[in-house]
Image: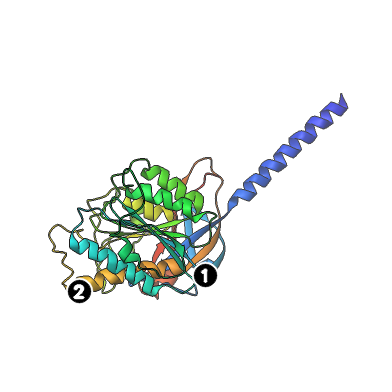
Amino acid sequence: MPSRLLTSLALVISMAGASRAQQNACKAVEIPVGVFSATGDVFRGLAAEDFVGRVQKKPVGVKSLSYDDGPRRVLFVVDTNRKLSADSRRAEEEMIAAILSTARPEDSFALLPARGPGREISFTTERPPFTKALGQSGEKSGKEPGVLDAVMAGIEQFGAPQNGDSIVVIAADLEGNHKANAKTVAKALEEHRIRMFGLALGPVAIKNSVASGSMTSTTSQGLAWTTPGVGDFVYETGDEHFFDLTANSGGVVFAVMNGNPQRSYNLSDERLLQSVRQKARAVAKIISAYYRMQIESPASAHPENWDLEINEEIRKHSQPMFVLYPRVLGPC
């Protein structure tokens, strides 16, 4: 009898120890954090103590912070819908060229067309004629993939995750899919540790109240502000998934073309052309360097929305700083 009691007691202690070990293991989470200026320049030299994280008003401890500017793998998913205007198609070419001109020799790029003709390009550090591939006939048969269909196919092409893996979606919207949807794409981005960025050729809507507060600053009102660099943009109507998918993965979407029905988007306007290029270069800069942050994630049985920002003392003595990070922690 005593022997059975000791055995049961040992089992309980063992299970308790395993439970504590599991809780401790789940507390250490690494996330990508981008901190950039209104022109897309990345802030260097920040330390762990410069950040303040909270889950439901409870503090989230930042254990460590390291700056990562290593080689990047970047996939372009480009909307080649035949209904796009000539200016939108030119904008796509200008943005791809701007990103490639900003890249380092060690960065590799790939391309997948969506909703129209185009030739796929696998990851390469060479610089083949990406823009010419957009109008070429592809080898695919059957229905042309939607934008999110192409994103899902591209995620598989990355294979084993590497630091800084990113997808840049250049599209009017994320509709017209045959298999993929926003939920499956969000899950795949999280599992493969890929950040998604957007350069929108149409209006973008915000419906996620948690994500909508992600880029406030001392000079902004929500997501509406005007700067000489990235430009002014207000997300009110339009595609309902573009913002959430990018923000929740740790990325960002910029409204580049056709976002305001009261405005003419003609690339013969030199100011608009420079704005298009600048937004693309801003995305390239944000992808090229970010912080790898180790945080103490609170144990939870379900995903938790959280907030991360630069502490007030740093913000008071700096130009506006915008923070990008995955919006959800857990479950543990």
**Can residue 68 be seen in this snapshot?**
yes
User: As displayed, is residue 295 above or below residue 3?
Assistant: below
Q: CA distance from mark 2 to mark 1?
A: 33 Å
Q: Which image quadrant: the N terminus?
A: top right
Residue 62 position, x and y percent, is: 55, 61
User: As displayed, is residue 25 above or below residue 163?
Assistant: above
- Residue position marked by numbered label 1 in the rendering: 70
- Residue position marked by numbered label 2 in the rendering: 271
**Residue sitting at 45 percent across and 52 percent down?**
155
The amino acid pointed to by label 2 is: Arg
**Residue sitting at 41 percent across and 52 percent down?**
248
Q: Quadrant of residue 273?
A: bottom left
Kindly state the secondary structure of the residue where label 2 is placed. Answer: helix
Residue 230 position, x and y percent, is: 29, 69
Q: Is residue 294 left or right of residue 100?
A: right
Residue 306 position, x and y percent, is: 45, 52
Q: Quadrant of residue 272?
A: bottom left
Q: Counting residues from the N terminus, which is met first, the one under dot 2 or under dot 1? A: 1
The amino acid pointed to by label 1 is: Gly
Q: Is residue 331 left or right of residue 114?
A: right
Which mark, by number, is residue 207? none
Q: Which image quadrant: the C terminus?
A: top right
Q: Residue furthest top?
A: 1
Kindly state the secondary structure of the residue where label 1 is placed. Answer: loop
Residue 301 position, x and y percent, is: 53, 40
